[in-house]
Image: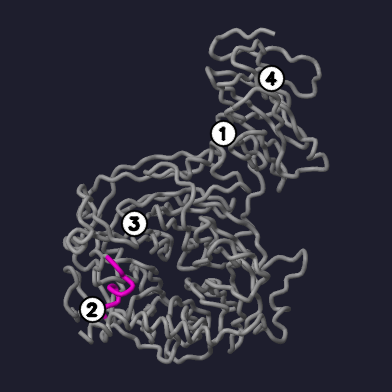
């Protein structure tokens, strides 16, 4: 009994002790750890550009934010899984389909991790990927526009935490389910039948190498465990993906204790090249599912949502040599591969050491069948046989590891609030610095790739107490920038972040800035409601719908006076921005609309749907400051009672009564 008690209490006691230690290490006030020339190292003069783009997940905000490094300037907030009034994302009729799922419109989700596209294991600056953790989805961001171009839902998944992680040449984005769940036709089962009925999956989402278009190539069924994070191999380990997983106990309640019973859980190693062979050999089984696949077309400026109905699955019991487990102490979280692809670093949240595995030894163990039994029929490789070594005398609560260009690794420690630098080959600890406080992820520019840029490491912290001016019960989330160009790490900057920053990746600005799109060419606008020139502006009645084909250009709308709309009708404002000049968007809003506004880029068409609720005169105006006469960029729309004899009419620059307009439904309209 005593033994069981200790096993159950130990993890909590470990964390409590760590937290106590962490609190003891905190500064008493707001003093800084910055010394010497730190400010000059983070300073970017006005008019000068930063050296790196830093893409940071927004956590519960559902957004992705973009900062310049080393200044920490906020450059852009990209709405991904959330509506965004600043961009009009999710408010216009054209963007609403991007947030569609098999459960309908879900306008808010939880974005945890970032992945940037790579070629030969090196960032290529084409796409960023983000995950929706709650309703499992993967988004692809086009880095020429900094907008979501595609979102795909992942079936047979629950809690999409272990994603999106990308293979060496962007062949696949992988996604492991956080929660195992019943899969198949009968999902109404007792929760306490977890060990019998619950299964996990890892999904391989294929990418078109030119367009980046996504599709779910195949899923692998796994034992009913929880997947946390993942990394693809590179170099000598290309063709493999490594997933950290916990709850090998298969507990279904109070996981804080019950999923920490064993000394070791697993890192799951998947040979995806072998999986491809099984797919080609016809070993996959098509399963009936429902998931949404949403694409945004930059020529029609419109998203289309399609519901897909099947997915190809592979079962390891039918596909030998495809999946292996490696023991990893204890409750593994981080799972990272070094730039060479030889070393895989596991980080057990409750472990006091960092195990480093050798890909070469993994291959030798597989060839020699050096197993330590099986887990649900999947071979478990012997820990000692695949271990390169253990980093000793670290900190409390190792989470994530990134790498520099000098053969060093940097691991974050949540409980002891610090970053530790260590050498990959001899595993000696070289340096440690405190973070303020409770660091989660960390990022080195290029750190997860084959070509790190070892100038900075950025800490993404969970708590900022004492670091910023108070803002009520909740303080800003934050990041901290450390110079790692020398032997010792030096804190040089704090900067606030959007939402809760989880993971981030940074890459040289030169890879993206040169390709940034400035306008959409008006002659290439294929939106079916586009108005290509003021002369084509018009207002049409189609049944109970009023379609306003409107243009915007500094500093007026055409038309800007509209009459004849009747209560009970729905008005669609199709606004085309005729500007062909960089950084001149126009906004559009009408009083009383419960759909706040549009933001229309140069050459683009967006649609606002409005259902008037009372008769009267309603102003409309541009919401984005566009010129010295921006305030004058406005107009009126008149709404009359259902039986009123007010003809549908429109005008711009005329004070005379406008001519009546014909209706497409054949009805006659009289002045």
Magenta stretch: dominant SS?
loop
- Depth check, front residue: 230 or 234: 230
State the colouring used for the structure image. Answer: one colour
Residue corresponding to mark 4: 563
Which mark is first along the chain, 4 or 2? 2
Q: State the CA–CA distance, disc 3 to disc 1.
A: 38 Å
Q: Is residue 656 above or below residue 501?
A: above
- Numbered badge on residue 381: 2
- Numbered badge on residue 158: 3
Question: For the C terminus, which image quadrant?
Answer: top right
Residue 451 visible to an observer of this rendering: no
Please tell me whether mark 2 sits on a helix, a strand or a loop: strand
Magenta-tinted stretch = 253-262
Q: Nearer the viewer, mark 2 or mark 4?
A: 4
Q: Nearer the viewer, mark 2 or mark 1?
A: 2
Which mark is first along the chain, 4 or 1? 1
The percent coordinates of residue 663 (x first, y second) are 59, 13
Q: State the CA–CA distance, disc 1 to disc 4.
A: 28 Å
Q: Nearer the viewer, mark 1 or mark 4?
A: 4
Which mark is first along the chain, 1 or 2? 2
The percent coordinates of residue 157 (x first, y second) are 32, 55
Q: Residue furthest right?
A: 628
Q: Are marks 3 and 2 in contact (CB under 8 Å)?
A: no
Q: Are marks 4 and 3 in contact (CB under 8 Å)?
A: no
Q: State the CA–CA distance, disc 4 to disc 3.
A: 51 Å
Q: Residues within 10 Å of mark 4 (few under 14, many from 20)?
A: many
**Residue occupying image coordinates x 36% and y 40%:** 307
Q: State the CA–CA distance, disc 3 to disc 2.
A: 28 Å
Residue corresponding to mark 1: 526
Question: For the N terminus, which image quadrant?
Answer: bottom left
């Amino acid at each position: 009994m005593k033994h069981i008690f200790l096993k159950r209490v130990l993890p909590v006691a470990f964390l409590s002790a760590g937290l106590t230690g962490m609190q003891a290490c905190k500064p008493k006030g707001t003093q800084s750890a910055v010394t010497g020339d730190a400010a000059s190292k983070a300073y970017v003069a006005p008019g000068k550009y930063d050296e790196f783009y830093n893409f940071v997940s927004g956590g519960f905000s559902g957004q992705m934010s973009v900062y310049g490094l080393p200044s920490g300037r906020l450059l852009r907030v990209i709405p991904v899984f959330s509506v965004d009034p600043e961009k009009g994302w999710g408010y216009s009729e054209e963007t609403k389909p991007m947030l569609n799922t098999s459960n309908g419109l879900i306008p808010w989700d939880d974005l945890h991790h970032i992945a940037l596209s790579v070629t030969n294991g090196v960032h290529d600056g084409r796409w960023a990927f983000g995950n929706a953790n709650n309703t499992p989805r993967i988004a692809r961001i086009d880095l020429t526009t900094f907008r979501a171009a595609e979102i795909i839902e992942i079936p047979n998944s629950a809690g999409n935490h272990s994603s999106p992680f990308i293979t060496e040449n962007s062949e696949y984005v992988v996604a492991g389910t956080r929660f195992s769940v019943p899969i198949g036709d009968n999902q109404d089962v007792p929760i306490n039948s977890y060990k019998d009925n619950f299964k996990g999956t890892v999904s391989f989402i294929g990418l078109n190498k030119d367009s980046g278009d996504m599709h779910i190539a195949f899923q692998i069924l796994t034992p009913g465990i929880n997947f946390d994070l993942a990394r693809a191999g590179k170099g000598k380990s290309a063709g493999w993906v490594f997933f950290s997983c916990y709850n090998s106990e298969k507990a279904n309640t109070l996981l804080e204790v019950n999923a920490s019973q064993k000394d070791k859980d697993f890192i799951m190693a998947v040979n995806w090249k072998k999986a491809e062979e099984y797919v080609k050999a016809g070993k996959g089984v098509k399963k009936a599912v429902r998931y949404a696949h949403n694409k945004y077309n930059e020529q029609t400026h419109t998203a289309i949502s399609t519901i897909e109905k099947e997915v190809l699955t592979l079962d390891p019991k039918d596909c030998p040599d495809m999946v292996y487990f490696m023991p990893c102490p204890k409750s593994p979280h981080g799972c990272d591969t070094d730039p060479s692809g030889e070393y895989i670093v596991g980080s057990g949240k409750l472990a006091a050491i960092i195990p480093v595995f050798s890909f070469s030894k993994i291959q030798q163990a597989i060839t020699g069948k050096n197993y330590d039994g099986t887990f649900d029929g999947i071979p478990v490789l012997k820990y000692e046989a695949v271990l390169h070594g253990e980093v000793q005398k670290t900190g409390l609560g190792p989470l994530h590891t990134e790498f520099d260009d000098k053969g060093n690794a940097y691991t974050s420690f949540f409980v002891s609030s610090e970053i530790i630098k260590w050498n990959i080959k001899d595993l000696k600890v070289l340096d440690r610095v405190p973070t303020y406080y409770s660091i989660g992820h960390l990022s080195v520019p290029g750190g997860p790739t084959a070509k790190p840029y070892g100038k900075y490491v950025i800490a993404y912290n969970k708590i900022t107490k004492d670091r910023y001016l108070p803002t009520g019960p909740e303080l800003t989330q934050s990041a901290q920038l450390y110079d790692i160009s020398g032997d010792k790490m030096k804190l040089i900057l704090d900067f606030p972040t959007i939402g809760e920053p989880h993971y981030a990746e940074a890459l040289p600005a030169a890879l993206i800035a040169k390709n940034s799109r400035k306008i959409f060419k008006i002659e290439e606008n294929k939106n079916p409601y586009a108005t290509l020139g003021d002369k084509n502006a018009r207002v049409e009645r189609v049944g109970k719908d009023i379609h306003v084909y409107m243009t915007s250009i500094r500093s007026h709308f055409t038309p800007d006076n509209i009459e004849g709309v009747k209560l009970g009708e729905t008005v669609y404002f199709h606004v085309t921005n005729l500007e062909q000049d960089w950084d001149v968007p126009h906004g559009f809003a009408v009083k009383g609309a419960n759909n706040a506004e549009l933001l229309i880029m140069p050459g683009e068409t967006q649609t606002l749907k409005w259902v008037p609720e009372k008769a009267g005169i309603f102003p409309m105006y541009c919401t984005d400051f566009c010129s010295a006469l921006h305030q004058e960029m406005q107009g009126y729309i008149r709404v009359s009672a259902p039986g009123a004899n007010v003809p549908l009419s429109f005008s711009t620059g005329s004070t005379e009564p406008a001519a009546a307009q014909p209706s497409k439904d054949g009805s006659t309209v009289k002045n």
